[in-house]
Amino acid sequence: MSFTLTTPSGFWNPLFWVIFLALFGLIAYLIYSRGNPSYKKESDQVRPYLSGNIEPAKEKVQVKAGDIYWGFIEALKGYYKILEAIHTGDIRDYILWYLGVGAIVTFILIGGV
Amino acid sequence: MIEHLPALMVALPLFGAFIAPLFKKHYKGVSIWAIFITGISVVLSLLLMKEVVTNGIIMYVFGADKPTLVLPSGYAVPIRIMFEVDAMGAFMAISATLMSFVGAIYSYSHVKKDTGLEKYYALLMLLEAGILGMVLTGDLFNLFVFLEIAGIAGSALVGFRNYRGEASEAGIKYLMVSSVASLMVLFAVGIFYGQYGNLNLAYIAKNVSFNMVDMIALGLLFASFAMKCGAVPMHYWVPDAYTEVPAGINPPLLVATYASLYALFRVSFTLFANVVIDLARVGWIMSILGVLTMFIGVTMALIQKDVKRLMSYHAISQTGYMLLGVGVGLTVLHDPSKLAEFGRDAMAGGVFHIINHIIYKSLLLMTAGALFYVTGTRNLNEMGGLARKMPITTISFMVGAAAISGLPPFNGFASKFLIYETSYRLNPLLTVFAMVTSVLTLASFVKVFASAFLGPPLEKFENKREVPKPMIVAMLILAALCILFGLFPNVVLDKLVYPAVDALINFAQYHSWGGLA
């Protein structure tokens, strides 16, 4: 059974990728195995040091999904403003969009453009 | 039995659906019945594919032994209902049966606390019958009837959890959208019937004169099927429906969506294949719709906080890749050198992406369903640290996320690779959009992974455990398929995808009812 996928401009063989993955996995393991052996999982070693302050609850320090990519979304605020404005959730708008696109497509097909 | 396969494909789930209500209040019985029926359907669809690949197009005429039978009055045009199964139809049938089977296994545990399960499973099998009818029929009116069956069953399933207001609203929206699209399809069918006095796809395709009225019918069919497959800017119903439907129904509902995409391809390639100038125009419309769909879908996904809604927007985005791949092929369909150079491979990328997407998106939506099952919420802001509690769901999610993002060696990479390469040959800008979309897809799933699975363990999930075994089995089947299709893309392409693409390209075969005319 051949692994090679031939495409118009070249080829792709997933087997090579798997071999490289295994190789890099091995390198990663070697680096990991040279780590500090005195590390103990269930001890104070894993507690963060917050200048002597008490560690807040995990829920309070967790990065929420809504905060991830905040900068990206903020930079594209104008684009998202339009996008959110057209996603009204109103079924009448859904049908209007359909009618609009249908009219444009039909106009193009009958030779209007 | 083999010669009756096309009819059996539809009859079996219909039979299963009508028997299901007899299992009232026996949720285990009806669940096992649905798994059994959908399992046999998978076997039948594989047999059907084997038969089509070996012997070519299968013609199944209800009430006669061949399509060219002449009536005593001398009336020679086909008047009977026919199923005409080529490799593209068989390919879609495999997708439909496989996903209904996986959905039934997943549902065994996922919906066991709900009531009215005999209706749930009856509707699941009815949805399967509707999809199979759509992809196997060779008759336009039949296509409309099965579109309606799939639409009604689908909307009832979307609103199945009617104790949630949002589910009822989503169900009604899906029903409205489906009804309007079906009505316009019926109107287009009426236009053809009025002009050519027939409803057989191959017959109309041979006789269509491409006058203005025909082109209006094409416009109606194109827009209706594009809306039903969730193309931007007619995609608004998709996140509503996919979010609210029980996760076990997500796989067959996805296939129902792509059955409309199949219908769009069937109309463009089979019905209107002989129109020379406008076909490139249709191809460009499809490609541009594809790019818009993928980009707007992914950017909307990026800002979602509801995990299923986020994944639903990705479903829209991935539809864009399919439209782009097949659109590129359609644009150069009448240019033999370009078709051989990259058009056929572009279509192969698009068609391959259909099954890849059905597999990994079903997997991802099931992991989202698993998260909801365990945590009782779909809000990503309220999740965290679940990898420790749900290790198998986490691994399944990672496989699905890598596949949808087009990371090698998973299945999404192979089809996207073909689409990138070939769309570049038509216009490099198309590829730029496709690649940027992939990057944003990865970013979006990194967000889900980080917020739901990673992070410190949260106290409120202290006593939570992994989902029940049937849900795990369903997810693992799909995860395994993501890996297998990624490791052996050429096998899938040679056995399933290229025969399907060639069936679309060699439309003359379809027009002659597999050589019978």
Image (cartoon, rainbow, N blue to C red):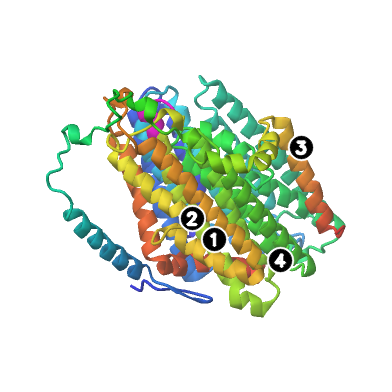
- CA separation in Å, label 1 and label 4: 18 Å
Q: Residues within 10 Å of mark 2 (few under 14, many from 20)?
A: many
Q: Which residue is mark 1?
A: B351
Discs 2/4, front: 2
Main secondary structure type of the part rendered in magenta: helix
- CA separation in Å, label 3 and label 4: 29 Å
Q: Which residue is mark 4?
A: B273
Amino acid type assigned to the residue bearing label 2 in the image: Ile
Amino acid type assigned to the residue bearing label 3 in the image: Leu
Q: Are marks 3 and 4 in contact (CB under 8 Å)?
A: no
The mark that comes first in sequence, 2 or 4, is 4
Discs 1/4, front: 1
The mark that comes first in sequence, 1 or 4, is 4
- Residue B342: x, y in percent? 59, 73
Badge 2 element: helix
Q: Are marks 1 and 3 on the same chain?
A: no
Which residue is at the front of the view, B487 or B207? Answer: B487
Amino acid type assigned to the residue bearing label 1 in the image: Val
Residue B372, magenta (yes or no): yes
Q: Which residue is mark 2?
A: B355
- CA separation in Å, label 1 and label 2: 7 Å
- Seen at 33% across and 27% down, the residue is A58
Direction from residue A48 to residue B6 in the image, left or right: right
Which chain does the residue under circle 3 lie in? A
- CA separation in Å, label 2 and label 3: 31 Å
The magenta segment: B370-378
